[in-house]
Amino acid sequence: MKIILRNFLTVFCLVFPFIAKTQSLQIGQKVPDLLLRHVLNYEDTSLRLSKLKGKAIILDFWGTNCPSCIIAFPKMEALQKQFRDRLQVVLVNDQDLDSTKRFFANRSKIPFPQLPMITGDTILQQLFPRNYLPWHVWIDADGTVSHITDAWNATDANVKDFLNKKTLSITNHEYIADFDYNVPFFAEGKGRWLDKVEKYSFISRCVLGASAGWGNGPVPGNDSSYRIARNCESIVDLLKAAFSEGGKYNLEPRSTVILEVQDTFRYVVPKDSKDWDRWYVQNSYSYNIKVPIKQAATVYNAMQGDLMQFFNLTATIEKRKIPCMVLIRTDRQDKLRTKGGEAFSNLLMDSENPVKQIRNMPFSELSIILRIRFENPAVSKPFVDATGYKGNIDLQFDAETWQDFNVPELRIALQKYGLDLIEKEWITDILVIREKP
């Protein structure tokens, strides 16, 4: 367990004049010849570093409020014993001499470590400021700082390689003096740690002026992460995005959402545009989630949980019989079968061609595009393909009929091919949103 230090530095006791001008030491820099006082378990009450010349040093910064520091004392004693001719482990804390003695005196089950211990330290903590405990500084036999690292790296193998001047594959730490603990991690330092964040999700108020919606998919420039990002959307639209699961369910038509709530005003955008400014400020939200790409399959489940918990709602996909626009076959004679030729479709093209057509392409091309046209909040009824037709087809429409999506005229055009669009009760997937008590 690491103990985070919020108040990093206490008032300094400037024992030597150079300390007042000394910056923190970095890896590769020489350690000054310090005289350190208030030393326990040593031949004297003070310790001068030059007296340890020829030995490597591990400064083990610890505190009485750091259980993992205390648990590690026997391990550090064993290292000292094993490498006693070439290594000196020195324990360092910033609690005064009397407090340190009392700590051990009042805890009979914690034996006093058989290692030199500097108490009431204000000098080493200035040279080696730290973010947490335990914090280890490794100094080679020449007095040069070699590593500033975690306590777990103090292993037999690492220490042996260190003493033999071999390169160690351990992580060195940089003290971050300006870290702001009062802001979210990913926002700290104007987002300087974002590249380290593997997973996050958040809900915020609408960010007016930003893009209306950012979509979903792999993070641009980072194919190892997947995200969903929405901005300035109603609670219902956010839930629809979560429960549609990237197109698995068609929840765009109005009739596919049922609100079982006391007052719908806070959930959906009002029809009267004069209310929009006030409504968007008070009732629209942004949602953002990022996960490792291997968790992309479950990202919508995570989004659902976030939204339901935050808004105190339950939402479920249920099967209900509701009015739908159903595409059916009206003629046993196959008037769609292709005559062959090069595959072509311009149904989704904005061309000046007066004819919209499909040539020698699967029937699903028509079905999918009709569904896309019906997947619109302005359309009250969902689309269902009940034809069961397989195979490639030829079909064409008047461009104006298709572009205006005039349903009566579209029906006439479809009837030429033995198809029709009819309104019919159909069991389909709907989203039911309920308020919790």
Image: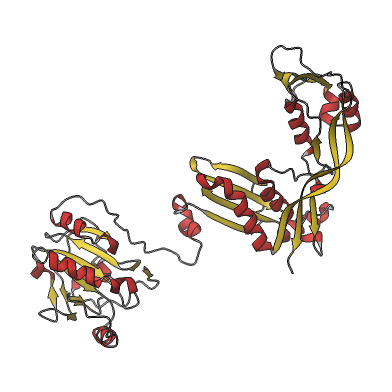
Where's residue 307, x and y in %? 65, 58
Describe residue 173's horizontal placement relative to residue 237 as left or right. left
- Residue 205: x %, y % from top left: 65, 59
Residue beneath the point at 19% across and 73% down:
17
Closer-to-camera residue (193/292)? 292
In the image, taking residue 305 as reference, residue 426 lies left or right, namely right
Nearer the observer, 49 or 217: 217
The relative height of residue 433 versus residue 219 in the rendered view (above or below) is below
The N terminus appears in which quarter of the rendering? bottom left
- Examine the image and state in which quarter residue 44 appears: bottom left
Which quadrant holds the C terminus? bottom right
Q: Is residue 240 above or below residue 352?
A: below
Q: How is the image coloured?
A: secondary structure
Residue reaching furthest to the front: 332
Q: Is residue 17 left or right of residue 176?
A: left
The image quadrant of residue 397 is top right
Residue at 35% from the left image edge and 68% from the top image edge: 132
Residue at 76%, 15% (x, y): give it.
Answer: 338
